[in-house]
Image (cartoon, rainbow, N blue to C red):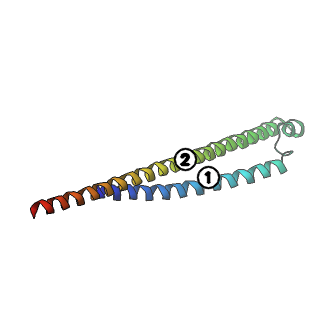
Amino acid sequence: LENDLIRTQLEIDATYLALDDAKRKEEAGHEAMIARIQYMYQNSNKYSIWDAILNSENLIDFLNRIEFIVQIYKTDREMLAEYTANVEKVQLLADNLSAELDNLLTMQENYEHQAEYLEVVMEVLDIQKN
């Protein structure tokens, strides 16, 4: 039982580390999205479909601008997917940590009850022996 307690404590420590790492990634992703949204808002006239249509000098320029806009959209979707995955990972790790802590508390209570029971048994055996 003591080995189970030690193993569970090690799992909890590993989950704390993973949770901290996931929270850092989530925060970094959030900051990157904020910076990207701010940049896109400030430069929205440069990277719009209408700008590509109205200000293209020729077909090749038009296609290049459209390709650039598509790449921006694709990058934004990838960043959003990564951020969402990080948020979900943080929640999952937090839930796992909570469950592991509950499990550890239950194991500790069981350990204490078994220790108390063994003490009573030892006292009874001592009384019977004498």
What secondary structure is found at the residue carrying circle 1?
Answer: helix
Question: Residue farthest to the left?
Answer: 129
Q: Which residue is mark 2?
A: 89
**In the visual, does 126 lie left or right of 32?**
left
> CB of mark 2 within 8 Å of CB of mark 1?
yes
Give me the residue at 51% from left, 47% from top. Answer: 95
Q: Which residue is mark 1?
A: 26
Q: Which is nearer the eye, 87 or 65? A: 87
Give me the residue at 56% from left, 50% from top. Answer: 90
**In the visual, does 68 lie left or right of 22?**
right
Give me the residue at 45% from left, 53% from top. Answer: 101
What secondary structure is found at the residue carrying circle 2?
Answer: helix
Q: How far apart are the two marked residues, 2 and 1, measured between alpha carbons?
A: 9 Å
Mark 2: amino acid: Lys
For the N terminus, the image quarter is bottom left
**In the visual, does 73 lie left or right of 5?**
right
**Residue 93 to residue 10: above or below:** above
Residue 50 horizontal/vertical position (percent):
86, 37
Pointer 1 local density, CA inside 10 Å: few below 14, some 14–19, many at least 20 = many
Mark 1: amino acid: Glu
